[in-house]
Amino acid sequence: MNQIEQSDPEEAELVASYEAGEWRSVNNLREETDRYQEYARSTFKKVNASTCRNHLE
């Protein structure tokens, strides 16, 4: 049994996509990492605010 068969379906899909050459490197990795971290922080703040608001009702 290979590693793909042992993983969950989502992980297997990512591995297959990578192996098919569908992923590309970015020249500005640090900038892209910072940008997506900010997206994640913003999303977390929205979810957290919504959760807190729901608990107060």
Image: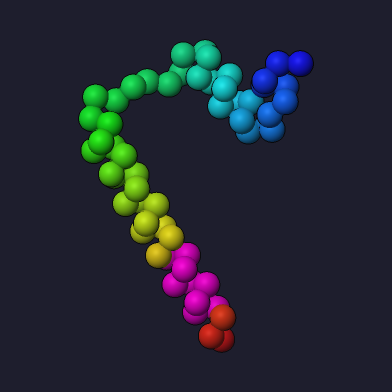
Q: Quadrant of residue 42?
A: bottom left
Where, quadrant-wise, is the N terminus in this rendering? top right
Could you tell whether 57 is left or right of 35 in the image?
right
| 54 lies left or right of 36 | right
Query: Which residue corresponds to the image point at 33% horizontal and 22% vertical from the top-left?
Result: 25
Q: Is residue 13 above or below residue 55?
A: above
Residue 56 vertical placement versus 6 (above, below): below
- Quadrant in the picture for residue 4: top right
Look at the image and say whether residue 28 sits in the magenta stretch.
no
Image color mode: rainbow
Q: Position of residue 8 (x, y in %)?
A: 69, 33
Vertical order, 11 against 25 (above or below)? below
> Residue 13, position in %: x, y?
61, 26
* Quadrant in which residue 7 is drawn: top right
Give the residue at x 39% y 52%. 40
Outermost residue, right direction?
A: 1
Residue 19: image location, x then y, percent: 53, 14
Task: Look at the image and give the residue range highlighted in magenta.
Answer: 46-54
Count up the numbered dots. Answer: 0
Q: Residue at x 58, y 19 (%)?
A: 16
Kindly give the residue lying farthest to the top in the view shown: 20
Q: Quadrant of the C terminus?
A: bottom right
| Magenta portion: prevailing SS class | helix
